[in-house]
């Protein structure tokens, strides 16, 4: 099956912080899961470069060549994702020709539909959101997300007649419960579309940066109208029809809860107008805060994910972000919590379990044992149910359930060791000891598969110690979740995966 997943494209007026890394790591986790089970995956990310705030950031940095500034900044984002080992298949920039061409093609489809008209708009504009905001959305006169006073703007510009699609969109959302998730966001969107979804101004006059409107070069395209189209241009729209047909519609757009109106109302209306299929799902995740405050440059509390990865390790960062908040909810980032999770879940959890098993295996020079004796059935059942919960968690976008499944299996393994005490059997009951250790080795292998999408390097380190190659597992549909697919021998215990003294 094909699986297309996207992240939002990021503004480049700043470098990535841990909140952005969270969004991207979430998408990477899904992409890795789907590759693992043999799907044909396309994972798209990129940068949103035609925003006025990028231009202002260039100015503030004393740069006169805006494009050169964007090139440098976009490279910082791409490089950060590479260093975080994000497995994206393409990285789209909205200043690329392939994007600009697709945007013009798309605009023409909407215009031919009769959905573009000229009008005057007066309203409050928040530069942080790059959007007009309603008075009722302000908190003490300030944008609730950016804590800034919006400007009053009155302009003649071009409008997209999205209100025409209001009813169609509402029935689509009603009929397709998975389209907007989680359910709390779905309700929010239904109310928004029903009560507030009006035609959107999609051009700005006298703006010095952006994609010129094909019908009026004195206007540039509204940055959200342009940016949303990246989901098409990033997979071939306007430049590779075959690729586009293979990967569109997207299976899921991963977005933050602050940008759902654009993704769940404006974007589908644009697609309906252009006559293109809608994405299958839009999943809105929550926010990481620091001491309850939104993370951001303007807040002065941005944490660099690369620093955390360098100090604590890439998989520790991934695990912490994915474990700390139930997927879809909010949470606070704290180094104390990270240390706590490191010690309890990683060092004393998976790390200790793997060490215990592999040192036992090394001690008896474990070599593949066919007959695993009386305890095999029980262990096999535990793996089966952990695998089912893990798979169901991914299908239901409940990442925390997947992690619970993996850690339940680790606990099962630990309790099995405590109960059977294999070390005490090595001398006098060797056969029994070998069978128990054989079961434990299999449990380690099964755990490694469950953690792979979340902690790919940890899984790979375990595979190496078990003498299994990545290519023997990733994409091998029949192996994932099946019992004893590998004849494991020659185990190397290696050093602790998560040492307690660092
Ligand atoms: N450029 C737009 C998206 C256009 S998509 C067609 C944008 N960019 S952004 O850089 O401001 O934000 C990108 C994503 O990062 C958003 O989904 C946003 O929710 C997410 N996050 C930014 N800060 C975050 C946290 N503190 N926590 C979790 N996600 C956060 O919006």
Image (cartoon, rainbow, N blue to C red):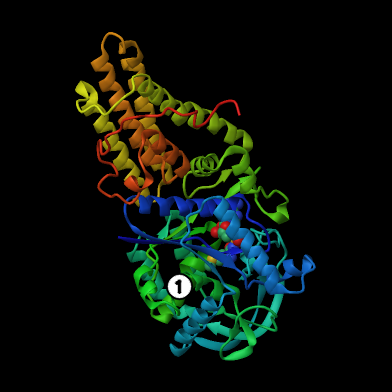
Residue at 33%, 57% (x, y): give it: 39
Residue 57: x, y in percent?
A: 73, 66
Residue 390: x, y in percent?
A: 35, 43
Q: Is residue 329 left or right of residue 433?
A: right
Residue at 44%, 64% (x, y): give it: 190
Q: Is residue 268 visible?
A: yes
Q: Secondary structure at mark 1?
A: helix
How packed is label 1: few (under 14 Cα within 10 Å), some, or many (20 or more)? many
Residue 439 lies, with reference to residue 301, above or below; the image says above
Q: Tell me the residue that label 1 is attached to.
A: 232
Residue 351: x, y in percent?
A: 47, 29
The quarter of the image holding the C terminus is: top right
Q: Is residue 19 left or right of residue 106?
A: right
Res. 342 image quadrant: top right
Residue at 40%, 67% (x, y): give it: 279
Question: Is residue 298 or residue 248 the one in the foreground?
Answer: 248
Residue 331 lies, with reference to residue 151, above or below; the image says above
Res. 418 image quadrant: top left
Residue at 46%, 77% (x, y): give it: 270
Residue 383 lies, with reference to residue 279, above or below; the image says above
């Amino acid at each position: 099956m094909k699986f297309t997943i996207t992240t939002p494209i990021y503004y480049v007026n700043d470098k990535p912080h841990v909140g952005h890394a969270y969004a991207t790591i979430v998408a990477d986790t899904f992409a890795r899961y789907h590759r693992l089970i043999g799907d044909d995956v396309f994972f798209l990310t990129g940068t949103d470069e035609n925003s006025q705030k990028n231009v202002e950031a260039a100015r503030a940095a004393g740069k006169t060549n805006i494009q050169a500034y964007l090139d440098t900044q976009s490279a910082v984002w791409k490089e950060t994702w590479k260093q975080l080992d994000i497995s994206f298949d393409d990285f789209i920039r909205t200043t690329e020709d392939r994007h600009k061409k697709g945007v013009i093609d798309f605009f023409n489809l909407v215009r031919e539909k009769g959905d573009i008209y000229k009008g005057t708009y007066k309203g409050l504009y928040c530069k942080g959101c790059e959007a007009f905001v309603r008075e009722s959305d302000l908190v003490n006169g300030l944008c609730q997300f950016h804590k800034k006073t919006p400007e009053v703007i009155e302009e003649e510009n071009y409008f997209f007649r999205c209100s025409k699609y209001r009813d169609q969109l509402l029935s689509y959302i009603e009929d397709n419960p998975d389209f907007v998730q989680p359910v709390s966001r779905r309700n929010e969107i239904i109310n928004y579309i029903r009560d507030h979804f009006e035609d959107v101004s999609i051009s700005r006059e006298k703006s010095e940066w952006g994609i010129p409107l094909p019908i009026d070069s004195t206007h540039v395209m509204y940055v959200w109208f342009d940016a949303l189209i990246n989901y098409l241009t990033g997979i071939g729209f306007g430049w590779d029809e075959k690729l586009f047909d293979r990967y569109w519609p997207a299976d899921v757009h991963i977005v933050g809860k602050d940008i759902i109106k654009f993704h769940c109302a404006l974007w589908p209306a644009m697609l309906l107008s252009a006559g293109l299929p809608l994405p299958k799902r839009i999943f809105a995740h929550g926010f990481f805060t620091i001491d309850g405050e939104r993370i951001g440059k303007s807040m002065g509390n941005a944490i660099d994910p690369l620093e955390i990865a360098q100090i604590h390790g890439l998989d520790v960062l991934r695990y912490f972000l994915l474990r700390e908040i139930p997927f879809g909810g909010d949470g606070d980032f704290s180094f104390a919590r990270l240390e706590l999770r490191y010690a309890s879940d990683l060092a004393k959890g998976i790390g200790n379990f793997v060490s215990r098993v592999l040192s036992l295996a090394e001690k008896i020079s474990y070599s593949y044992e066919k007959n695993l004796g009386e305890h095999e059935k029980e262990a096999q059942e535990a793996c089966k149910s952990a695998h089912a919960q893990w798979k169901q968690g991914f299908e239901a976008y409940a990442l925390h359930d997947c992690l619970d499944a993996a850690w339940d299996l680790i606990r099962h393994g630990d309790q099995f060791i405590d109960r059977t005490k294999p070390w005490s059997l090595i001398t006098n009951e060797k056969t029994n000891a070998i069978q128990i250790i054989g079961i434990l080795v299999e449990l380690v292998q099964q755990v490694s598969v469950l953690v792979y999408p979340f902690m790919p390097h940890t899984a790979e380190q375990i595979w190496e110690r078990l003498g299994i190659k990545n290519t023997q597992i990733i994409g091998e549909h029949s192996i994932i979740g099946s019992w004893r697919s590998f004849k494991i021998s020659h185990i190397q215990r290696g050093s602790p995966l998560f040492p307690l003294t660092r």
